[in-house]
């Protein structure tokens, strides 16, 4: 929706860097002293997942659990 021009959204700098460089996205002020933003993994535990979906979710959760916080932040 952001790429379609329907609004603004906080994105991690490393996630948006290529699109900003390619002028597909534009950074709005603040340009410096950006606030830390928490990112959450959300899913519906009642949803029946196929094998690929379950493996992806487990890989994401394992990566979060096994990566120290200081490695996951870049402030």
Image: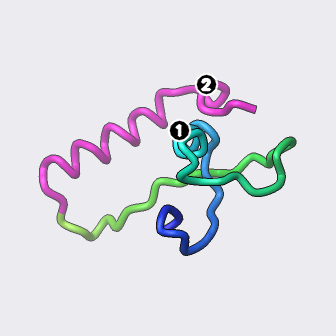
Mark 1 or 2: in front is 1
Provide the secondary structure element on which disc 2 rests.
helix
Using a 10 Å C-alpha cutoff, classify the residue at mark 2 as few (fewer than 14 neighbours), some (14 to 19) or many (20 or more). few
* Residues rendered magenta in the picture: 49-75
Q: Position of residue 35 (x, y in %)?
A: 80, 48
Taking the image as shown, residue 45 lies to the left or right of residue 73, namely: left
Residue name at image x 31 percent, y 47 percent: 57
Residue 56 occupies quadrant: top left
Whole-percent x and y of residue 61? 40, 42
The residue under the point 32% across, 37% down is 59
Sequence order check, earlier mark of 1 and 2? 1
Q: Which residue is the site of mark 2?
A: 71
* Residue 72 is one of the magenta-drawn residues: yes
Residue found farthest to the bottom = 6
**Which quarter of the picture shows residue 50?**
bottom left
> Residue most toward the front?
23
Give the colour scheme of this rendering.
rainbow
Looking at the picture, tell me which residue is in the foreground, 17 or 23. 23
Mark number displayed over residue 18 = 1
Q: Quadrant of the C terminus?
A: top right
- Residue under the point 42% across and 33% down: 63
- Secondary element under disc 1, as helix, strand or loop, is helix
- State the residue in front, 29 or 54: 29
Overall secondary structure of the magenta section: helix
Q: Residue at x 53, y 65 (%)?
A: 2
* Residue 56 falls inside the magenta stretch: yes
Res. 42 mark: none
**Where residue 10 sits: x, y (%)?**
65, 57
Q: Would you place residue 46 above or below residue 29 in this image?
A: below
């Amino acid at each position: 929706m952001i790429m379609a021009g329907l609004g603004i959204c906080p994105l991690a700098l490393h996630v948006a860097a290529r699109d900003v460089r390619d002028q597909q996205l534009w950074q709005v002020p603040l340009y410096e002293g950006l606030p830390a933003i928490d990112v959450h993994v959300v899913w519906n535990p009642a949803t029946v997942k196929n094998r690929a979906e379950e493996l992806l979710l487990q890989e994401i959760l394992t990566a979060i659990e096994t990566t120290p916080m200081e490695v996951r932040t870049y402030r």
